Amino acid sequence: MVIRQVFIILVVLISNISWSQSKYTVSGYVKDARSGETLIGANVFVKSETESGASTNTYGFYSISLPEGDYELICSYLGYQEKQISLNLHQNQTLNIEMTEGVIIDEVVISADKEEKRKNVESTQMGTIELPVENIKLLPAIFGEVDLLKAIQLLPGVLSSGEGNAGFYVRGGGPDQNLVLLDEALVYNAGHMLGFFSVFNSDAIKNTTLIKGSMPANYGGRLSSVLDIQMKDGNDKKYAVEGGIGLVSSRLTVQGPVKQNKSSFILSGRRTYILDLAQPALKGSSFEGTNYYFYDLNTKWNYVFSNKNRIFFSGYFGRDVLTFRQPTRDFSFDLPYGNKTATLRWNHLFNDKHFMNLSAVYNDYRFEFSGGQDEYNFKLFSGVKDWNIKADLEYYHGQKHTLKYGANITHHTLTPNTASAVIGDVKFNSKFKPKYALEGAAYVLDDIKFSKNFSFNVGARLSSFSQIGPYKSKLNQDTFGTFQFVKTYFTLEPRISANWKLDINNSIKFGVAKTAQYLHLVSNSSSTLPADLWVPSTEIVKPQLGIQYAIGYFKNFHHDKYEASFEVYYKDLWNQIDYADNYVNDISKEVEDAFVYGKGRAYGAEVFLKKNSGKLNGWFGYTVSRSERSFEAIEGGRWYPAIYDRTHDLSLVANYKPFKKWDFGVVFIYGTGKLFTPVHGFFIVEQQINLYYGPRNSARLDDYHRMDISATFTPRAKNTKRYKGSWTFSVYNVYNRKNPFFVQFNVDTNKETGESQVSGSKITIFPMIPSITYNFKWNQQ
Amino acid sequence: MKRSIFYLLLLTINIFSCEEQYLPSIPETTPQYVVEGYVEAGDSNQPVIVILTKSIPYLSKVSAEVLTNSFVKGAKVSVNDQQNVVQLTEVCLNDLSDDQRKMALELIGLEGDSIGYNICVYVDIFNQVKREIGRSYDLKIDVNGEILSSTTTIPSQVPLYNLIWEEPPGAPNDTLAQLKVHIDDPGDEANFYRYFTSSNGGALIAPFSSVTDDVFFNGQSFEFPLSKAESRDGDFDPDTFGLFMRGDSVTVKWCTIDKAHFDFWNTRDNAANNNGPFSSYTRIASNIQGGQGIWGGYAVNLYHFIVPPK
């Protein structure tokens, strides 16, 4: 019924625009002139009428249809020189545009171009923010490690999951409700070292888009947000090397042409070495041989067959490796975990207006633990493995419609904690088998410029999820063979957003999006851990559902130097999953048997003010919000604030470039204290003090605030030599605020008097931390 | 698992972290009644015993006076063994002679000189409750009209056998020994185990993780190392942890318990062991209606020996 309605609306809207026989299409790719890297979101438009234009898609492709005639086309992109091209349009035409990076003149640092700035008011998208990596690199970073996930936490509506942590919560949703994509491959665990670093090496990243509001219909599978990250394609003209040497890790990226202007590669690696350096100190101790490190490898290769066909292969491989050794007791364990992803893509143009991307994606997240002492050995393994095929098509119908449609199917293998132990000759195995599922979706959406002042993005997504065999039902003991369907869920997810332009500088937008999520990560920790399990929807576990309503006012002022927005949102969430209060993590039991189900709601208001250009630029963000949950099995369904709830959240980000050789950055963050469940008292059993707790999340830690600063010195900023180096000095938590990371309750006994007392202590983990990083770049002349 | 991850974290960030006292503002809460009661069968002569206390508010100092005051006196405590309802008798240590006091403390599992406060318990002093394997027991407590109740069972015994002493793994050691035991786990039902150890006549204490179910080894016969229970008040020594001293006289109390009894200790041990940045709280699963604590049945197997010299 709803599908039919959506379809009728689409047909009516499309037919509203008449076909014009005398129209021709100009289309092509927009690229960086020096590296050949395609530019995402570049604007191509006709000089005299800015409404006749388009933005490049994720692959740098654009298509504009115009009546026959002569035009001055303008192409612009953030940080690049605007390009003007004369066009005699008398037939369909391919026009690839190469853009040159902006010359750094004294006045301008990184300035968004005029059209770029106008997106705030003009586009139908709301709650969408693009963060260029070059901007992120100028921000102060803890240990000097530039981190994309920490930069997005500075945006309104996005909260950090903890001090120094790369995990994030969007608009009151959980950490598993964010769709994190790296070149279209889903990243199941985006953190290294318990989340203190993200898996994204900024040197290999081209573009990052965060969608926290009305998710368009081409995305799905998560309730809260999309973080879509594209890797660089690699320079197809010249070789280039860049890297950095820091206190914690070092990075190196090599890129260059495989075949000039046709094919290129990029290879990027990063590894930490703090504990490697500590190895001599451990020698001879009880823990000799204990070590920890992580590394990442990103690679991408592409080949342009013709203007109509291009293929890409991209891969990511990352691991955290912990080895613990205690030779004096013959005790040891190894704990490696990490992600592997591979994406093969084919970009194909059916014609000037019809673009297709076909992807095959493989990803694999595994967590392993193996340890032992003497003849006792224990192994644990869990993981997620996906095979995914997806087709995404775009049809540029005239100037008023961009139609996107597509479908995808994913085969999931989710391995729960599979434990095995060996004691001498006896073997023990947990009986859990992997669970299998097929997840599918088909979508259609249209971005419609209805009139000069009114535009829509309307679409729908039909998603399905089937648990498949081999499986033995827990409900009726039925046995299912390979690929036999156990249980199937369907969800229709309508999405709409609209823009009503009041005048050239002011607009009002609203959006409604329904979303479904079929894979769940439930953690009973205050933060997500690598050992936390992803579990599928099954005959027992229902899909999570959510609906978000948002409305906002968007304004540009001072000749587009400033942009501002004010958004409010309300979310309803169903089939939320948690553990009961007396849950004990036990690897011999399936987690889904310990789940409890409930509902959630979240609402809030966000203010965003951004200065785009000038010596001083940056932004201010403020959020006031509430996120609540209610579970029948937890205190009888009482609505309590979710662990993701933070009443106030404020961030101030500024970059200042007073001189050619110096860049300064400052970040200030303030947030209401994190929630926790307080101890209300204690009782004695077996002569031991046992704590009993008050209601869930009924107390808060102290408010969080912190300031970080950075200074980047580029000795030869104007130098056109092949080698360029820069020093970044940064100080994290500059006024040494002791922000509590967590509260711990201990029982202290005075051995002389025999008196005991329960005491709370707050643990601060990051005081003021100065750091220094050297970054370098070498380019073939 | 969580612990090892926690250590990893500590290893890497310890140099930066700092700890400060924290006094959260916590509302006044009314104290709750806490029951600690046991009924044992098998290798046990212990009569049914119930300790009834009131919980102590957070931020109170646990002094002898506070502990003495936490015992609830004058309650009507009765146990129904499905044949008879037996009224337990309230006994306070300070009312007893020295000999009686010593005997009573032994029953509770305490060493006499370590107690600086008055303990009051409810005991089946004439041993009237029929304590046997397979029976279930209803507890009812009436404190000034407020009713607490619970039920427990004593499941079948599952004995240990082939108890042997071995060299601990790792570097050679003359003074320490590792205890190894065998068990045949019954396959037809879920079994739950708890154990205690004592050395040289000291009190029987339970290890940090004192309970296990048989999900992982249901129906199997196998050998496993049994760790010595360490006092929570003592200092943790990674080189001797879980090992027995050669020459010591050792007692192992090996028990089977029912599901609710297991859940109590399982959540209790988890709550006591899990403390750190990534652990959320664990609410202890009590089987007492109207209060906190445990009413638990034990099927006891007792083993005494002297750890042989190398």
Image (cartoon, rainbow, N blue to C red):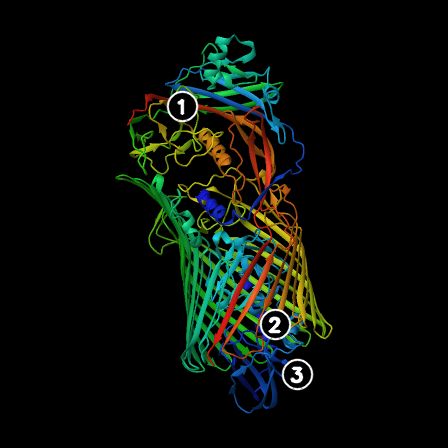
- On the same chain: label 2 and label 1? no
The chain that hosts pointer 2 is A
Q: What element carries label 2?
A: loop
Q: What element carries label 3?
A: strand
Q: Distance between the residues labelled 2 and 3?
A: 39 Å
**Amino acid beneath label 3:** Glu
Q: Assess disc 2: are there few (<14), some (14-19) or many (≥20) residues with their C-alpha within 10 Å of its C-alpha.
A: some
Q: Is mark 1 on a helix, strand or loop?
A: strand
Q: Position of residue B187 (x, y in %)?
A: 32, 33
Q: How far apart are marks 2 and 1 (CA)?
A: 72 Å
Residue B289 in view in this figure: no
Q: Residue beneath label 3, please?
A: A49
**Amino acid beneath label 2:** Lys
What residue do we see at 53% from left, 63% from top?
Answer: A773
Q: Residue beneath label 2, please?
A: A661
The dot on residue B277 is: none
Instruction: Evaluate if marks 2 and 3 touch, with contact meaning CB atoms under 8 Å apart.
Output: no
**Amino acid beneath label 1:** Ser
Q: Residue beneath label 1, please?
A: B198
Q: Quadrant of residue A25?
A: bottom right
Q: Quadrant of the N terminus of chain A?
A: bottom right
The chain that hosts pointer 3 is A
Q: Assess disc 1: are there few (<14), some (14-19) or many (≥20) residues with their C-alpha within 10 Å of its C-alpha.
A: many
Residue A528 to residue A218: above or below: above
Relative depth, front residue between A576 and A208: A208
The chain that hosts pointer 1 is B
